[in-house]
């Protein structure tokens, strides 16, 4: 007889949802905010649009982080096997770690992307600075991905007694 509570998978699925929803919301905000700046830049210097798409691409990568973590967590949810409450909470924590850092990174990329793309119209030296700051913002999401991956490996260590 298993002592795994029947509601334990709820927390695992909450981790899947939070990872995907929060990181995608951050990516959507970053894409929209940077896209507004790119549209403004396109009115004055259309030849700079392709170089200015970097914030949009970096925002999309944030959503991929959330997708990877969601797929990994969902892979650990097997209805034919027992699922301990410990694993549910670890999966929830992993999803929140990836999702919340993805949300923060998306906001940072959007704000920096919008401001720097608008400044790039007037001064081309801003481009290198923009890329560096965007990399630092992207790393926030990468930290969450790494923590979520480490947590996901710990979720399989427990069993039901």
Image: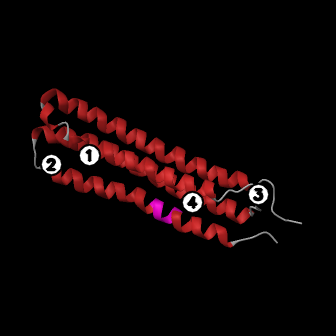
Is label 2 or label 4 in front? Answer: 4
Kindly report the distance in space between the C-alpha atoms of the residues bearing marks 2 and 1.
Answer: 13 Å
Q: Mark 2 vs mark 1: which is more N-terminal?
A: 1
Is label 2 or label 1 in front? Answer: 1
SS at mark 2 in the image: helix
SS at mark 3 in the image: loop
Kindly report the distance in space between the C-alpha atoms of the residues bearing marks 2 and 4.
Answer: 36 Å
Categorize mark 2 by other alpha carbons within 10 Å: few (<14), some (14-19), many (20+): some
Q: Quadrant of residue 27?
A: top left
Kindly report the distance in space between the C-alpha atoms of the residues bearing marks 3 and 4.
Answer: 23 Å
Is label 3 or label 1 in front? Answer: 3
Residue nearest the viewer, comparing 26 with 161: 161
Give the side of residue 57 with respect to residue 42, left or right. right
Kindly report the distance in space between the C-alpha atoms of the residues bearing marks 4 and 1.
Answer: 28 Å
Is label 3 or label 2 in front? Answer: 3
Residue on which disc 3 sits: 80
Residue on which disc 2 sits: 126
Q: Is residue 88 visible?
A: yes
The image shows residue 5 at horizontal and vertical percentages of 81, 59
SS at mark 1 in the image: helix
Q: Mark 4 vs mark 1: which is more N-terminal?
A: 1
The image shows residue 153 at horizontal and vertical percentages of 58, 68
Residue on which disc 4 sits: 94
Kindly report the distance in space between the C-alpha atoms of the residues bearing marks 3 and 2.
Answer: 55 Å
Give the label on residue 54, or none.
1
Please give the name of the residue rendered at 53% of the width and 56% of the height, measured from the top-left corner: 69
């Amino acid at each position: 007889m298993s002592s795994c509570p029947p509601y334990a998978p709820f927390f695992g699925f909450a981790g899947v949802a939070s990872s995907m929803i929060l990181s995608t919301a951050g990516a959507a905000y970053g894409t929209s905010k940077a896209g507004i700046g790119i549209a403004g830049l396109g009115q004055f210097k259309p030849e700079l649009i392709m170089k200015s798409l970097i914030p949009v691409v970096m925002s999309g990568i944030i959503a991929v982080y959330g997708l990877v973590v969601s797929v990994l967590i969902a892979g650990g949810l097997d209805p034919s096997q027992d699922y301990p409450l410990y694993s549910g909470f670890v999966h929830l924590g992993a999803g929140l770690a990836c999702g919340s850092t993805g949300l923060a990174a998306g906001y940072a990329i959007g704000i920096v992307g919008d401001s720097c793309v608008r400044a790039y119209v007037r001064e081309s030296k801003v481009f290198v600075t923009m890329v560096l700051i965007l990399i630092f913002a992207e790393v926030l999401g990468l930290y969450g991905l790494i923590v979520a991956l480490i947590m996901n490996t710990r979720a399989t260590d427990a069993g039901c007694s």
